Image (spheres, rainbow, N blue to C red):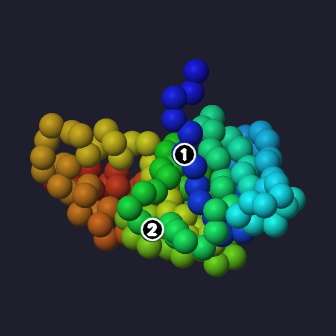
Amino acid sequence: MKTITPCLWFDGNAEEAVKFYTSVFKDGKILGTSYYGPGMHLPEGTVLTVTFEIMGQEFMALNGGPEFKFDEAISLMIPCDTQEEIDYYWDKLTAAGGQPVQCGWLKDKFGLSWQVVPRIIEKHLNDKDQAKTDRVMKAVMGMVKLDIAEIEKAYREG
């Protein structure tokens, strides 16, 4: 039983965004689409919601209108095992108008914030040796797209 399904608010381009996300994530799939009916907020037949799944997580995309925009207060984290995975997601999500930010964060072309991070970072940032944790954090703060080799180097050297 799923307990939480994030709902992402779009301004008329929910269907386009979902098609993009399900193309980026190899296991992505559209689960269902609903439409505005007569007398509703947008014209009848306009996509209202698209339910989709990526990496085993269900989401709903809502065409709610221009009232609300994405901001950095929330981001979706993609844990990666290899640098190739980091590079893949980084390149796909920053393509066609996306923007790199810092420390593994980026914004996609729809304005949604993502974190593309190596799985190993959680272990390194929770190490009992504070000096190692500090070195890793300092290395990460100096990066835009995260580099596993540089993070590992910072963790080991001291």
Asked if residue 53 is positioned above or below residue 8 in the image, the reply reads above
What residue is shown with label 2? Answer: 71
Quarter residue 21 falls in: bottom right
The tag on residue 104 is none
Asked if residue 49 is positioned above or below residue 126 in the image, the reply reads below
**Label 1: few (<14), some or many (≥20) within 10 Å?**
few
Where in the figure is residue 41, as x and y percent of width and height?
70, 64
Residue at left offset 23%, top offset 63%: 138
**Label 2: few (<14), some or many (≥20) within 10 Å?**
few
With 82 as the anchor, is 49 left or right in this view? right
Quarter residue 84 falls in: bottom right
Out of 13 and 97, give the one closest to the viewer. Answer: 13
Where in the figure is residue 119, as x and y percent of width and height?
44, 42
Q: Name the amino acid type tagged 1.
A: Pro
Residue at the extreme left = 130
Asked if residue 16 is positioned above or below residue 5 in the image, the reply reads below
Classify mark 2: helix, strand or loop.
loop
What residue is shown with label 1? Answer: 6
Residue at left offset 28%, top offset 44%: 124
Q: Does the rendering let one see residue 47?
A: no
